[in-house]
């Protein structure tokens, strides 16, 4: 099985579009539908991606048990072709995050995405101790996810980059241009920067100028060709094409996404249904799109700009 050193993984992640596959659930009892999930990983892996993040935010990490998370990650590792990086989630409290990291190693993952600690706010010193403990507990490359109650300052990330050789990346889920400018100016190429806001395509072009060479595309789940074309247009700075794709699809898509809390995930599963790749319902506390919203999304997808237009 292909392995990546942390530095190799960082370079690979930053070289292409990232996919966060949904997690398939059975419609009757909401159990993990592993066969359907593995078939979807095989489908997505036929496209060129920088890496696949199993059981991430779009994959409903927050609704999975620890045992289910390990099962999902293991399924992704087994279904993905040789050489495709699989990154696993870790999160909640520090000791729990360490257990997730160790489970990811057992499952054969190539790296970790470290989610914010559960519920409580934390000081910068507390975040440093949290990340350092997780990084010490694993040989895998680690990407920290800045959002919610884990807002990392440039000074904190610089300190972590010095103390954690296997810290390879920062995923921004905040959207603070000033903060991102300070982070990139301070750390430069030491980290790989990942755009992680919901529907990251809306921020992709301005973030590219700040060193954010890749982003997590939820749209890739159900419109992989469009997502890759959009990413290529961003990387080539073809502004007219990016603006066209935003106006024709991405922004109308976000209007549906914004109607309910949690729809950033629900709309992706609806997109899977609309394109004939159903992945089952979302788990509570999320709710699925209404029938009318699904019909609206389906019509929007049917009018998507042609690939490489």
Image (cartoon, rainbow, N blue to C red):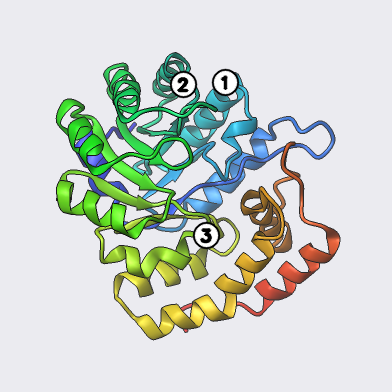
- The residue at which mark 1 appears reads as 66
The residue positioned 34% from the left and 37% from the top of the image is 143
First of labels 2, 1 by sequence position = 1
Judging depth in this view, the residue of 1 and 61 nearest the camera is 61
First of labels 1, 3 by sequence position = 1
Circle nearer the viewer, 3 or 2:
3
Spatial CA span between label 2 and label 1: 7 Å
Report the quarter where the N terminus lies.
top left
Q: Residues within 10 Å of mark 2 (few under 14, many from 20)?
A: many
- The residue at which mark 2 appears reads as 100
Q: In which quarter of the image is residue 27?
A: top right
Q: Is residue 117 left or right of residue 183?
A: right
Relative image position of residue 226 (x, y in whole percent): 51, 70
SS label for mark 1: helix
Relative image position of residue 243 (x, y in whole percent): 45, 81
Spatial CA span between label 3 and label 2: 26 Å
The residue positioned 31% from the left and 35% from the top of the image is 2
Spatial CA span between label 1 and label 3: 27 Å
Q: In this view, does 202 lie above or below 179?
A: below
* Tag 1–tag 3 contact (CB < 8 Å): no
Count the marks. 3
* Tag 2–tag 1 contact (CB < 8 Å): yes
The residue positioned 35% from the left and 37% from the top of the image is 144
Relative image position of residue 247 (x, y in whole percent): 54, 80
Circle nearer the viewer, 1 or 3:
3
- The residue at which mark 3 appears reads as 199
């Amino acid at each position: 099985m292909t392995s990546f050193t942390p530095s190799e993984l960082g370079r690979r992640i930053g070289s292409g579009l990232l996919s966060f596959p949904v997690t398939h659930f059975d419609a009757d009892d909401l159990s993990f539908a592993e066969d359907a999930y593995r078939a979807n990983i095989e489908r997505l892996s036929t496209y060129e991606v920088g890496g696949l993040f199993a059981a991430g935010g779009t994959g409903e990490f927050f609704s999975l048990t620890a045992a289910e998370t390990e099962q999902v990650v293991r399924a992704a590792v087994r279904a993905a072709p040789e050489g495709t990086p699989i990154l696993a989630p870790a999160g909640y409290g520090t000791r729990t995050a360490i257990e997730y990291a160790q489970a990811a190693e057992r499952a054969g993952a190539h790296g970790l995405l470290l989610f914010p600690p559960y519920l409580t706010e934390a000081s910068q010193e507390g975040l440093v101790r949290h990340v350092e403990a997780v990084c010490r507990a694993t040989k895998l490359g680690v990407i920290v996810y800045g959002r919610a109650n884990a807002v990392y300052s440039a000074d904190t990330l610089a300190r972590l980059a010095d103390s954690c050789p296997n810290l390879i990346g920062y995923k921004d889920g905040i959207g603070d241009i000033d903060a991102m400018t300070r982070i990139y100016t301070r750390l430069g190429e030491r980290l790989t920067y990942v755009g992680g806001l919901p529907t990251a395509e809306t921020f992709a072009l301005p973030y590219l100028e700040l060193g954010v060479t890749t982003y997590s595309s939820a749209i890739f789940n159900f419109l992989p060709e469009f997502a890759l074309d959009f990413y290529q247009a961003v990387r080539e700075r073809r502004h007219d094409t990016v603006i066209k794709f935003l106006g024709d699809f991405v922004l109308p898509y976000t209007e549906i996404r914004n109607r309910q809390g949690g729809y950033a995930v629900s709309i992706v599963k609806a997109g899977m249904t609309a394109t004939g790749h159903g992945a089952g319902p979302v788990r509570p506390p999320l709710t699925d799109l209404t029938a009318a919203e699904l019909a609206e999304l389906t019509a929007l997808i049917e009018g998507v700009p042609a690939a490489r237009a």
